């Protein structure tokens, strides 16, 4: 029985991967020459001859056809795909057409092979809508692996994510749609662009997202992680490094503490804006001053020791009160978060 169901719907046909769309479009040229149209009424597009530029395209599959993947071609180019079942009405919703006349064709890929509908000639007219409404992302420090919640409004057919101008992910869409966009950020200050497109228009939203760098170059061993330790909260990570090794700013910011503070020992705190602060504790030497602006990777001091072992105690706080004029109130304000996902190599 399991063998039968997998034969019915081979896995590779359940979804058409975006990267295959181009290849599929080329294949469409072959398809149109090889396919015989289905008998009238069996497989059909029920789209009116005159349509607005964004239109729903209802389709029909006969009771005798097996279930399969419906592929919608516009002027020989694959524009949409979806699962179709026999006798069940289905609709490709909000298909965007350029002004003018187009040839639409539905192809059903099933275990019986390929079947084509007759070509539907449609004339599209009206004012094109712009692709819109992508959920904003706040600037700030981000971990290496981040998932952005994105909403794409009606009008877009394709969403592309670019990191520093380079496309890293692209997908066809049936808007309006909310979807998670997963990104792996290189360390540094990155410009992220979300680009929604239809054949006529492009709408872009750009964000600056900073992925911090590792604060002790060349020393990657974490001896003690973030979380409960010996019945107390360990609010940062301990990075083992030789005494005197250079400690660098994990991200650009302003030094808001550069002196001794109780159990932290010699401490540097850097305000990165947006309520995010990094702490560099147990230093043997401090090489920055209060109020100084530092760049990502800029030397701030040297590794010292605490509890008999040389290490850097590194913390990241969010929602910190860094604008408070009383600098003592800035210390430990906010919520500690595990810095490792942010700075991990
Ligand atoms: Zn520690």
Image (cartoon, grey):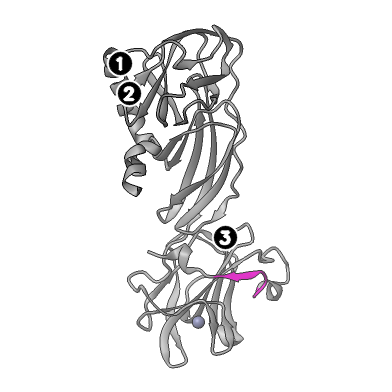
Residue that badge 1 annotates: 35
Instruction: Read off the magenta span.
Output: 331-337
In the picture, measured across the screen, residue 109 lies left or right of residue 171, that is left
Whole-angstrom CA distance, mark 2 to mark 3, is 57 Å
Tell me the quadrant of the picture where the C terminus can be found: bottom left
Q: Residue 272 carries which label?
A: 3
Mark 1–mark 3 CB contact (< 8 Å)? no
Residue 249 can be seen in this image: no
In the picture, measured across the screen, residue 140 lies left or right of residue 247, that is right
Mark 1–mark 2 CB contact (< 8 Å)? yes
Image position of 176 with respect to 49: above or below? below
The quadrant where residue 160 appears: top left
Residue that badge 2 annotates: 114
Whole-angstrom CA distance, mark 1 to mark 3, is 61 Å
Image position of 267 with respect to 217: above or below? below
Report how many numbered discs are placed on residues in the image: 3
Q: Which of marks 1 and 3 is nearer the N terminus?
A: 1
Whole-angstrom CA distance, mark 1 to mark 2, is 7 Å
Name the residue at 51% across, 20% down. Answer: 59
Q: Which of marks 1 and 2 is nearer the N terminus?
A: 1
């Amino acid at each position: 029985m399991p063998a039968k169901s997998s034969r019915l719907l081979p896995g590779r046909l359940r979804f058409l991967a975006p990267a295959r769309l181009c290849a599929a479009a080329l294949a469409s040229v072959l398809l149109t020459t090889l396919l015989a149209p289905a008998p009238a009424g069996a497989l059909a597009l029920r789209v009116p001859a005159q349509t607005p530029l964004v239109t729903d395209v209802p389709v029909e599959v006969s009771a005798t056809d097996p279930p399969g993947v419906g592929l919608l071609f516009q002027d020989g180019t694959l524009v949409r795909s979806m699962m179709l079942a026999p006798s069940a009405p289905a609709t490709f919703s909000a298909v965007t057409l350029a002004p003018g006349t187009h040839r639409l064709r539905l192809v059903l890929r099933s275990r019986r092979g390929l079947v084509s509908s007759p070509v539907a000639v449609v004339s599209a007219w009206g004012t094109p809508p712009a692709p819109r409404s992508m959920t904003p992302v706040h600037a700030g420090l981000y971990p290496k692996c981040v998932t952005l919640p994105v909403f794409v409004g009606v009008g877009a057919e394709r969403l592309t994510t670019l990191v520093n101008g380079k496309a890293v992910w692209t997908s066809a869409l049936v808007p309006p749609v909310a979807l998670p966009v997963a990104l792996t950020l290189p360390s540094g200050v990155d410009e992220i662009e979300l680009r929604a497109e239809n054949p006529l228009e492009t709408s872009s939203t750009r964000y600056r997202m900073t992925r911090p760098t590792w604060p002790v170059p060349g020393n990657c061993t974490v001896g003690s992680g973030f979380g409960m330790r010996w019945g107390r909260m360990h609010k940062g990570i301990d990075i083992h490094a030789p005494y005197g090794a250079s400690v660098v700013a994990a991200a650009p910011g302003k030094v808001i503490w550069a002196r001794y503070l109780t159990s932290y020992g010699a401490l540097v705190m850097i305000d990165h804006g947006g309520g995010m602060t990094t702490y560099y504790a147990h230093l043997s030497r401090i090489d920055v001053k209060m109020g100084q602006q530092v760049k990502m990777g800029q030397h701030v001091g040297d590794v010292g020791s605490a509890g008999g072992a040389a290490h850097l105690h590194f913390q990241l706080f969010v929602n910190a009160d860094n604008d408070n004029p009383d600098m003592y109130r800035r210390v430990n304000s906010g919520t500690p978060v595990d810095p490792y996902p942010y700075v991990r190599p």
